[in-house]
Image (cartoon, helix red, strand yellow):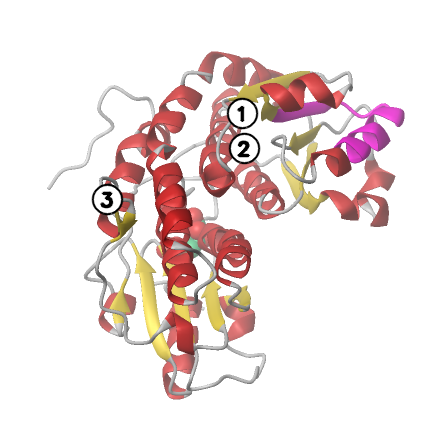
Amino acid sequence: FMVDKGNRRHFMEKEIHEQPEVISHTLAHYVDFVSGVSKPLELPFDFARIGRLALSACGTAYLAGLISKYWFERYARLPVDIDVASEFRYREMPLSANDAAFFISQSGETADTLASLRYCRQAGMKIGAVVNVRESTMARESDVVLPTLAGPEIGVASTKAFTCQLSVLAALAVRAGVARGTISRDEERQLVRELSEAPRFATQVLKLDEQIERISRELSRYKDVLYLGRDTNFPLAMEGALKLKEISYIHAEGYAGGELKHGPIALIDENMPVIVIAPHDRIFEKTVSNMQEVAARGGKIILITDAKGAAQAGIKTMETIILPDVPEIISPIIYALPIQMLAYFTAVFMGTDVDQPRNLAKSVTVE
Ligand code: G6P
């Protein structure tokens, strides 16, 4: 069937705006919003019986996996090994046939990810494929298909597939926690309720497009941008930098807040905006210290936070984007949106080919 842009300028813009709907659709495949529990799912292994979960993927899918490592370890006390597929397949790591491996891929065809899947298969591991294309090679070669229901994604820079991957992985982390006895039935209901709020919050965040467009106009004047975040906002910082460089060709890096002192602080001046992703969470104060370090060196800060964070930061920022106060488990899903919108509008101001950036392919089927 035909996929068109509707009334949007680019597929990427359309796909960003589809997120409330496709996140809802994807979550509903894994959890029951009414009863607040995980839906039945035939897994070829038992989360309670594995010692470790291996994850591998490329690009944006890898960063979704990296965020989920925090979830699996936090909610299910399940250790996660994760690597980009091009390293995973060659680094001769010890693998156990008693463990499971998930491969995350929009297309289900990425060469390195597929090779990593086959490598784990050889090692006798149970294989899950978190894929958006159900007829893909990875889906066929896995023991269980864990679909993202994002619908066709045309823009080369992944947006809705990413937040749907996060939705699947969050739901699986909750399921793993229940199986491993680290989440009670009450906590499960609470977490499922929180997951179910993601589409509504996403809709609210999309309404910030005018402010984000204005900030992007400013951002398009710079040559380098640094993204900082801690906890799940660290992989999200890397995703923000990846999105920006992919489609606007502005050089960007994503760093863990705590690593600022170990290198990137040398680059801070008025010519490099710093985008800080910092909801008011357990480690907010630590990120405030990082912002003080940046501000003291004349760095310009764009802070993405919530109302409480904005009130308590006590820092003069260039801009503050205030998101709704969201539960911890859905925070990466919701904070992904302003990150995507910043990259999108900046690329539009730069006049690049947003949906088909130079040198990149939607699906990389050769090594
Ligand atoms: C390419 C795309 C990225 C994507 C990556 C992995 O580099 O440009 O947007 O994240 O491949 O693709 P996959 O289909 O495996 O998710």
Label 3 neighbourhood size at 10 Å, few (<14), some (14-19), many (20+)? few
Point out residue 41 in the picture as x, y percentages from the top left corner.
23, 63
Residue 15 x %, y %? 32, 33
Is 353 placed above or below 320 here?
Answer: below
Residue shown at 73% from the left, 23% from the top: 313
> How far apart in space, not on screen, are marks 1 and 2 (Cα)?
6 Å
For label 2, the SS is: helix
Mark 1 = which residue? Answer: 346
Q: Quadrant of residue 13?
A: top left
The CB of the residue at mark 1 lies under 8 Å from ligand 1: no
Give the amino acid type for the residue marked by disc 2 in the picture: Ser
Magenta residue span: 288-304
**Disc ID at residue 41:** none
Few, some or many C-alpha atoms within 10 Å of disc 1 (few <14, some 14-19, many ≥20)?
A: many
Q: Amino acid at mark 1?
A: Thr
Residue 296 lies, with reference to residue 57, above or below; the image says above
In the rendered image, residue 182 lying in the magenta stretch gets the answer no
Find residue 231 and report its horizontal and vertical position in percent: 63, 47
For the residues marked 2 and 3, what is the alpha-carbon distance in whole angstroms?
44 Å
In the picture, measured across the screen, residue 280 lies left or right of residue 271, that is left
Name which of mark 2 and mark 3 comes first in the sequence: 3
**Residue matched to label 3:** 35
C-alpha gap between disc 3 and disc 1: 42 Å
Residue at 43% across, 42% down: 157
- Say which residue label 2 marks: 248
Q: Which quadrant of the rendered structure holds the N terminus? A: top left
Q: Amino acid at mark 3?
A: Ser
Q: Is the C-beta separation of discs 1 and 2 under 8 Å? A: yes
For label 2, the crowd category at 10 Å Cα-Cα, with few meaning under 14, some 14 to 19 and many 20 or more, is many
Point out residue 77 in the picture as x, y percentages from the top left corner: 53, 64
> What SS does tag 3 mark?
loop
Quarter of the rendering occupied by the C terminus: bottom left
